[in-house]
Image: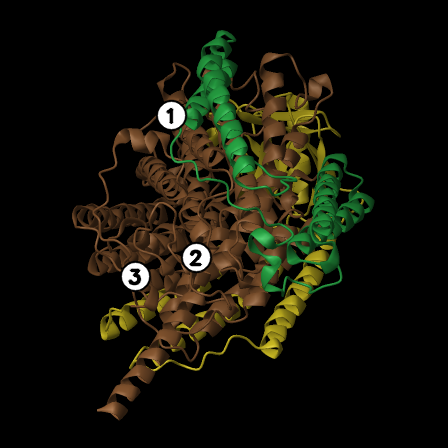
Chain colours: A yellow, B brown, C green
Amino acid sequence: MRRHAIGGGWHPRRLIALGLGMLVVVSVAGCMPAPATTQAQDISNLYLVFLGGGVIVAAIVWGLVTWSIIRYRRRDDRLPAQTSGSLKIEAIWTLIPLVTVLVLFGLTVRTLEAVDTVNPGGVNLHVTAFRWQWQASYPDSGVTVTGTGGQPPVIVLPVDTPIHVTLESLDVNHAWFVPAFLFKRDAIPGHPSLFDIRITAPGDYPGACAEFCGIGHDQMLFTIRAVDAAQFNTWLADQAASGSAAP
Amino acid sequence: MTAIDAPVTTVAAPRVGLLDWLTTTDHKRIGILYITSAFGFALIGGAIAEIIRLELAQPGQQLVSASTYDQLFTVHGTLMLLFFAGPLAIGFANAITPLQIGAADMAFPRLNALSFWLFLFGGLIVMSGFLTTGGAAAAGWTGYAPLSGPTYSPNVGMDLWIAGVALVGVSGILGALNFLVTIYTRRAPGMRMFRMPMFTWTILVTAVLILFAFPSVTADLAMLFIDRHFGGGFFDPSQGGDPVLWQHLFWFFGHPEVYILILPYFGIVSEVIPVFSSKPLFGYRALVFATIAIAGLSMGVWAHHMFTTGEVDLPFFSIMSLLIAVPTGIKIFNWTATMWRGSLRFTVPMLWCLGLLYVFTTGGITGVMLASPPIDFQAQDTYFVVAHLHNVLIGGTMFAGFAGVYFWFPKMTGRTLDERLGRIHVAAWVIGFALTFIPQYILGAEGMPRRIADYPASTGWEALNMVSTVGALVLAAGMLPFLLAVYRALRRPADAPSDPWGGNSLEWATTSPPPHHNFDRLPPIRSLRPVFDARIAAEAERREAERHEAGGS
Amino acid sequence: MPEEVRFFGRLSLFALAAGLIYWFLSYENAGTVLLLGFGVATGVAFLVLRGGQRRAAPHAAGGASDGDAETDTGPDGPFGDESAPVPTRSAAPLAVGFGLAVVVLAGAFGPWFVIVGAVPLLAGAIDWLRAANRELDQLSAATHRDTTDRSPGA
């Protein structure tokens, strides 16, 4: 049996990797975009809970493993006590995680209900995905915006208004993804999809296709331009009058 | 080392020629064939990954066209998952499971060899798509219809992908049957189910998963083939078909598949940690039931890959996916408890397992996040998922796979891999993993979609992509000490003892490598650790003999 | 009941329960069929194994739960299978594997690949079956045991 006195060379390296890892994991928290819809705010809150729980779990596991490495390094030939199990301990680390995931599930369901809520009134938006562009139309006023060649469409929407989106695809699976909304929905041919958003702050929010759809997948971009309701109505009226598709 | 260590013969092994390898039905040789071929596919898949990372390091299309890029990530995923991670586990299972249960060979040795050849040819067929004019399959390893259908992937490379995946599926099913029957019927007397080593248990459970998962994807592939060549419309809405059906059948396979790709490796960890902690595996029965629970649950979570379709029952799949975290956590806690108050030796296999405990844990945590549909609405199809899957597949599967290689290399070849090179390998991969994939978690959270050949400079994603690419190069470099260690070891004489590590299970009760029929004699099997028991008994005998001598003189 | 049998029973119960719950939650066809199918298949395996175990060891039916008796494993146990002679070498697996791979290529390149692949496939299969039959005959001659559901070292 070969003896390996790994000792000092390993512990600092591992602990440094550990420390870095924890720092980075925590910094991931700051890396979801600032939520720009009410639904996104709910999702962001939920994510922080999961992240917090995750940091705690990681700290416990990493702490225990690191402690073991330092404290239980082989020092002599004696055989340690051959403990093979403990029903009590097994029960503890089965029940606590079980309760934890049930709580997480409860919070998940609550957030889902908030995200799924459809509020009456507001604006209807019809989005059609096809290889490799987007078309957005406003059925209430007959305005349509279509992206072309090198010019992804700018989809103008009002702030603080329920927006009912219907999403369709003309060919393969696509997905409508706006990172600032912390949301995406697949556009599947034959399955029109409905969802609601409510934008909270004006601004330009980049969007992209998020379901691989062929060689133009990475070019299939769009921008959501959120403006206040008055500006939106003006824009919409202008578009309807001029009959043009330019933003 | 042990009472069984006295070599029965020291006749030099005859040189094994090509014909021997082509016609072997010996599970030990077939295991080596699987493992070597799997690593061959891994090197190709890894080279592809380097190209992908080099392309993504900066905005703009520098190295390959979008069309080539799409083929590359498709073949990368297909090779790594179906032709490396899975077959590597089967290779270990072949080499080790019959030994661990005290059998002379698998129940169906020729079927065993057939399974290997089907896997090898399947992988070659998938790759042959690159040689065709239309290029290899380019619909992702998940092959979603309608993109993989006749209109959007008319190239023959897509059919080659279907053929190759079908072959490896048949290979897996035949192998699974073989392992199931072998474990059920070929155990040595005394080797009850609850005395089987944990690795063998995971192989048994994995075999069942393979049996019930692969037919689903095989059916899916057959339906896709009919759509492509016989005017079928299974996945074509204009003919009354449904693209979502492809996803249901694919992920009913695809999710158990990822547990097929982790459970045997969890089994390896359960073998290595007790040996180098000088303690029994903590909570063996709990681990067995946790493994069965993971397998059962894994059959019921498939649509968490479909949360964003808007077509599936979100709460059902969310709760099932969250529940899987519980038995997985049990495993991690039991391994830690095995080390607790043990006497730890930091050999290379043990270092890999320690690395897994650190790295796999974060993958499990992000998996729990993804199990929550609202979070998944942001993270799905972004680099967050890419980071998660590589976190568990590298930090889990590959770390444990390397542990298995370093642990069982002496048993399989009679030579030991150089510890120093092994330590460099571990360090490079822990650091390389962090550099490559932690930036990807961040990129995904920020909204970088996956499967994109390029991204606009205005996103600001370049810096993290560059770090990730550097990490990928570290991973590639980290393979060099490993390959060097293998090369050097194979050039040395095969003089490893039967039990170089102080092992517990029956594979250490025979020579390294074992004779053709595996065992000349077996130690008594009265517990989970027959070789450990025999070693303790031999120690006691020796001390008794010394005492008599001292008393007599 | 030995663990070998229970194992499938547990999976079957779980899958059938999950499938039923899933149906009433979602009314989704594909997933329900898959889950219930999994449940039925493991249920069949459970019943077959239980039947086989009872046939092989009827007096042990009320015995230890997970094979406590030492003879419950190995050749004398309910699932035991005395070792067939271990086949040493055979080109049949390579021939069958290669043939099958070529046959499958017909999907990509056209039906005549079936003909090309059929040659090694059939040659290998015939060689395999002959060898298996030979071994089975040798085994029957060597031992006089009743070989119920033996497989001849395929």
Residue at numbered disc 1: B68
Q: Where in the figure is residue A145, as x and y percent of width and height?
A: 61, 26
Q: Chain of mark 3?
A: B
Residue at numbered disc 3: B348
For disc 2, the neighbor class at 10 Å (few under 14, some 14 to 19, many from 20) is many
Q: Looking at the image, is B129 positioned above or below residue C45? A: above
Mark 2 vs 3, N-terminal side: 2
Q: Secondary structure at mark 1?
A: helix
Q: Looking at the image, is A44 positioned above or below residue A180? A: below
Residue at numbered disc 2: B268
Along the line of sight, the residue nearer the viewer: A169 or B183: B183
* B54 to the left or right of C48: left
Q: Looking at the image, is A137 positioned above or below residue B544? A: above
Residues at circles 2 and 1 in contact by the CB criterion of under 8 Å? no
Q: Chain of mark 2?
A: B
Hey, what amino acid is under mark 1?
Answer: Thr
